[in-house]
Amino acid sequence: MKNFCIKTLGCKVNQYESDGISSSLEQQGWVRANKKQETDVFIVNTCAVTSKASMQSRQIIRKIIRENPDAKVIVTGCHAQTDLEEIKKIERVDQIVCHKDKNKIANHIKSICENNSSLIFKKTDHSKTNTFLGFDHAVKGEMTRAYLKIQDGCNAFCTYCIVPYARGSSVSMPEKEVFQHLKLLDDSGFKEVIITGIHTGMYGLDLEKKSSLLQLLNKINDEKPVYRIRLSSIEPGEINDDIIDLARPGNILCDHFHIPLQSGDDDILKKMKRPYNASLFEKIIHQIHKKLPYAGIGVDTLIGFPSETEEQFENTYKLIEKLPISYLHVFPFSARKGTPAFNFDNKVDPKVIKQRCARMRELDKIKRKNFINANMHKKLEGLVQHKIDSKTGMFKAVTSNYLTVFLNNHHDFRGKILDLVFEQCDSGLNIIGKSIN
């Protein structure tokens, strides 16, 4: 019996696709290898969102080759798509697979192992003929919560972003297939499905019968094929009252929104080619907080974009500081070859970028602590994870508003939805709570 390993870098879409490859292999009788086993095939699903992610992808490929000298090594993902020649320089990579053929990897591995046949590497298609490619089966993965990719690609071409060059134009999963996958995941026992995409808010605009993310969410809310769904991220200009209302109690959408801001300075946003300003972002955050005062609101920031002055950075810092945000993801600017920003003048000193990122991460800690305190002793709904935390020996649960809590009780509620209350929070922001069902 053959076994395999798969290493995933990057975003939730990559994780979904890796889970899809894994489940396809398992359907064909392959077994996921544990750390102590020799591996027949090792798949690396790479990331290119930053230059560091690309470098890490190459480092991991080389490490896997050193530690698994007899394994076939297959490389796919965004770094393979945008920097094919860099991957080709790595000796002993047996196959480089483009995005369009990710869903064929499982069917193709047998021929790779037997006779070294190759899939033809395809360049990214930026034309309107780009098509959505998913998996025929429901992708379950190893988590308590399942991912479902409903959209791929991007038409925005922000000046710093390599992803549209890797994944092509925006394409959507047909609505009928979305509901088929949700129902299959529900039948498999999943209580939460994370709806994901590269630019999820563009869902449906490319379909023959045009639709929208709001239309899809409304229909999911009406039919309730699963217990609850969560949006992985959504752009500021694509959030409105109707979407926010779908996260009210009794509806299917989790009260958690992850929103890319990138910069709180209007001039920098223009240079980034972001289609909103700081005022709109601020308005959206207040809209959410007014309707859903305990909703989790996460924000992406991109620090040190070319020509960002100290004053412009402060505009970002002060905007976030005054808003009811729950947590931050802080990214240093990384020049990606092939994007317009790669050639922009007035690069910010890396030491300055590091200092600014450190300040933002301290602000993140403050925001997280404030949000936890606001939810202390409040009844929240949580999904208990299947795995027990290795450090504490306790079960973990994820609340609808995206807080993780360690459960201080003795019952095995794995995979169940419970009402919880937080009892305490330690200095490391670890939350201890209990079920009140």
Image: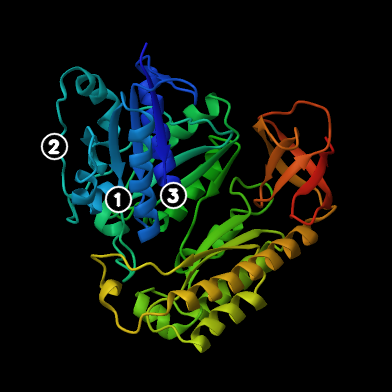
Q: Amino acid at mark 3?
A: Cys
Q: Amino acid at mark 2?
A: Ile
| Element marked by disc 2 | loop
Image disc number at residue 129? none
Residue 390 placement, left or right of 259: right
Residue hosting label 1: 79
Q: Is residue 184 above or below residue 389?
A: above
Question: Going from the N terminus, do you reach mark 2 or mark 1 first?
Answer: 1
| Element marked by disc 1 | helix
Residue hosting label 3: 11
Residue under the image location 24 percent in, 43 percent down? 90
Q: Amino acid at mark 1?
A: His
The quadrant where residue 139 appears: top left
Residue 180: x, y in percent? 42, 31
The local crowd at label 3, few if under 14, some if 14 to 19, many if 20 or more residues have their Cα within 10 Å, is: some
Residue hosting label 2: 120
Residue under the image location 36 percent in, 50 percent down? 47
Q: Is residue 362 visible?
A: yes
**Nearer to the camera, 149 or 320:** 320
**Labels 1 & 3 near each other (Cβ < 8 A):** no
The local crowd at label 2, few if under 14, some if 14 to 19, many if 20 or more residues have their Cα within 10 Å, is: few
